[in-house]
Image (spheres, helix red, strand yellow):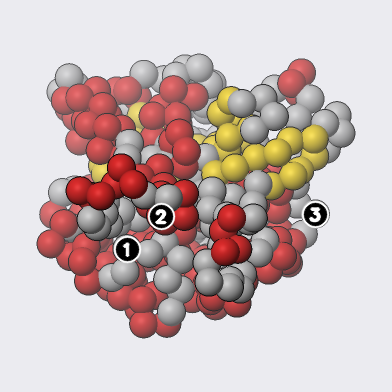
Amino acid sequence: MSKKVRILSLDGGGIRGVIPATVLKYVEEELQKKSGNSNARIADYFDLVAGTSTGGILGCFYLVPNPSSEPNAPSAKYTTQEALDFYAKEGYNIFNRSKRSSWLGLRQLFNATQYKPDTLEGIFKKEFGELKLSELLRKCLVTTYNMKATAPFFFDSREAPGKKRDFYVRDVTRSTSAAPTFFPPAEIVNLTTGEQMINIDGGVFANDPTMVAYTECRKTNFPQINQPSAKDMLILSIGTGGGQFQMKKLDNSGKWWVGKWATYIPNIMMDGALDTVTTQMRWIYETLNEERNNYLRVDVPHDYAKDYSSDMADASSENIAKLEKAGEAAVDEARKNGLDTLIQKLIDSSPEDPVV
């Protein structure tokens, strides 16, 4: 079998990031079993990781280099279990303790964001410190929307030096998770030029970043192959169990005030384009023969989606436990659709001389 370029794509979805974190815990454990390497990490078996919002946070977590210099130490600092624990430990602090107080709902007339960014920024600084995007272990794409340029922007850990761009990882994760009505925009600085950016959540245009990752791969040189086409790629795309929210009293929607619309906009924004990207990717791979199963979309089965809260900010211990169960259900469904086979292909496609 010819070696493939291996892509991991992670959707946005707030605290529902528990779902892909649970799925990837299974993937990492299987990689360790199948490879015979107990220190194997997600970073060892993907050539490109793309993420939006909570998926961008996860992607960066998996690619933080291990500061240990001990022989045979793992390449990455964090295990998938530690990434999952991050949500269980910090989710309540990010949302519940950061919620702004309101008086009769009038606060939304002056400040539409529900959560203060201080706790979130403090957590990112604690976890990522002074780590720069260019120091991540693999090529990493994280989406955001640049309000000053009024255009999508892709943070790229392996960008050409001529573009003169680098950023703190803590600023990248703050930018991609600045969901409108949840957190205020992120004001960050390009470390190379000093240029300021004002960014919001990449979910406004690419909540499922798989097509972004695919397009980027088509123009990138990898150890296995230069500028790969679809038949040269292995793609694991993981969702966050979205799409189950409901809009109430639609007959009266023409009279909704701004506060009412604000409660629905994030879900519309985050979930609206998911099915489109999945359909487009399946169309691409259905044109192939032996490689048609090299794209796998993993998400929560539809009949399981109502078991947890549709609120992307519900970080209660009860809901987090339900989200973990949903992630386990996603794993069970994915195994029926070839997840274990794809994991073996990830191992088989490891380049002999990897370039990070």
The residue labelled by disc 2 is 260
Q: Badge 2: how crowded within 10 Å, few (<14), some, or many (20+)?
A: few
The residue labelled by disc 1 is 310
Q: Quadrant of the C terminus?
A: top right
Q: Badge 1: how crowded within 10 Å, few (<14), some, or many (20+)?
A: some
Closer to us: 25 or 281: 281
Marks 2 and 1: in contact by CB < 8 Å? no
Residue 64, horizontal then vertical, whole percent: 64, 54
Closer to us: 148 or 129: 148
Looking at marks 1 and 2 on the same chain, the residue that comes earlier in the sequence is marked by 2
C-alpha distance separating marks 1 and 3: 34 Å
Determine the image quadrant of residue 164: top right
Task: Name the residue at 24% across, 57% down.
Answer: 248
Element under label 3? loop
Looking at marks 1 and 3 on the same chain, the residue that comes earlier in the sequence is marked by 3
Determine the image quadrant of residue 144: top right
Give, as a three-letter code, the residue at label 1. Answer: Ser
Q: State the residue lying farthest toward the front.
A: 255
Q: Quadrant of the N terminus?
A: top left
Task: Name the residue at 52% across, 28% down.
Answer: 223
